Image (cartoon, rainbow, N blue to C red):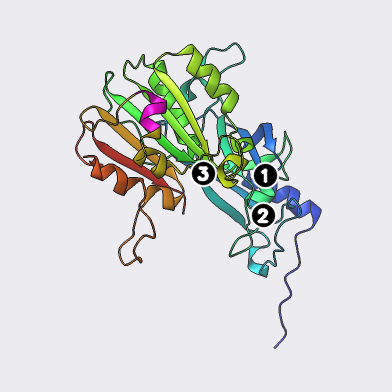
Amino acid sequence: MNKIVVTPPTQAEIETLRRTTYNATLIQRIDIHEDLALFRIKPDTQTVPFQPGQYLTLGLGYWEPRVQPTQEELLEPKKLRKVVKRAYSISCPMLDGLEQLAPCSELDYYEFYVTLVRRADAPPALTPRLFHMQEGDRIFASPRIVGTYVLSGVQPDEDVVFFATGTGEAPHNAMSAELLSRGHRGRIVSATCVRLRRDLGYLAAQMRLSTKYTNYQYLHFTTREAENTNPGFPGFVGKQHLQQVVESGIFEAAAGMKLDPERTHVFLCGNPAMIGYQPPGAPPLSSPGMLQVLKKRGFHDHGEDGPGQIRFEKYW
């Protein structure tokens, strides 16, 4: 029996695939460094109303080039004309060029905060292609925006605390801008942990926002700077994982507030080890995550409306 040979699409076929598959344009790309960037993507039609904290799916054809150096990818023939898709929480610039609040509802594009994955258990498919894109290039953006990691039940005078690792900060930026646009009166604290300070992609905007709104505060912690890893370094503090800064009291001292389950909503997004979620049948956790730390303080799983709840989003 003759073997069917599947050849890669020609350039003419690629142009047809792009025209029939993609429905949005990359209008701005802001590189924080070579492995971290903000992507602003505008759909061909109007943006869809959504609740801050939700996510949509981005997609690029396997026929698109990949940025290098990244792990080698050997595609199965059946993928040559298919699209790789991944879900991303929608972020927010928070402030516009005139230093005015810019919640998602006032934007005509979607903003995404993305880390380039160069190597993984399986060759990464989407981010190497996304990081090869230039402004004006086309992409698929799902018209359907979904997710339950939202601000439902938060009242104007209650405190809200967001804990994130890395790009898990994205939905918290959207939610913080939304709360401030509502005239939220309670405290809003957004705490982020990254490896290195250069990974704080929103630091400048966050600092300006903290100055502009007295009830908003941004705290950032690192794990791999010299003060985290070198005991002889002046000001050595050790690795500052979020669960550790909460347990030690560092968070409450820095925020100037108590994590009070009687008035505080907590949101967690990012690394599974930080969150501390243990799926059924999984091995015991090697160390407590935020879920375990907060429950000791009287917080509880998301359920009925009201403060004291822990809501979490996970990227795995």
First in sequence: mark 1 vs mark 2: 1
Q: Residue at x 37, y 39 (%)?
A: 248
Task: State how far apart marks 2 and 3 are (Cα).
Answer: 28 Å
Residue 236 location, x and y as percent? 55, 39
Could you tell me which secondary element the residue under label 2 belongs to? loop
Q: Dividing the picture into quarters, in which one does residue 79 lie?
A: bottom right
User: Which residue is disc 1 drawn over?
Assistant: 35
Could you tell me which secondary element the residue under label 1 belongs to? loop
Q: Is residue 179 visible?
A: yes
Residue 34 location, x and y as percent? 71, 42
User: Which residue is disc 3 drawn over?
Assistant: 238
- The three-letter amino acid code for the residue at tag 1 is Asp
Position of 79 compared to 242: left or right? Answer: right
Please report the bounds of the magenta region as a residue range. Answer: 251-256
Q: Are marks 1 and 2 in contact (CB under 8 Å)?
A: yes
Is 45 placed above or below 148 here?
above
Task: Name the one closer to the observer, 224 or 315.
Answer: 224
User: Which residue is disc 2 drawn over?
Assistant: 118
Task: State how far apart marks 1 and 2 are (Cα).
Answer: 9 Å
Task: Name the one closer to the observer, 274 or 24.
Answer: 274
Where's the N terminus, which quadrant? bottom right
Residue ranking furthest to the right: 11
Is 2 placed above or below 105 here?
below
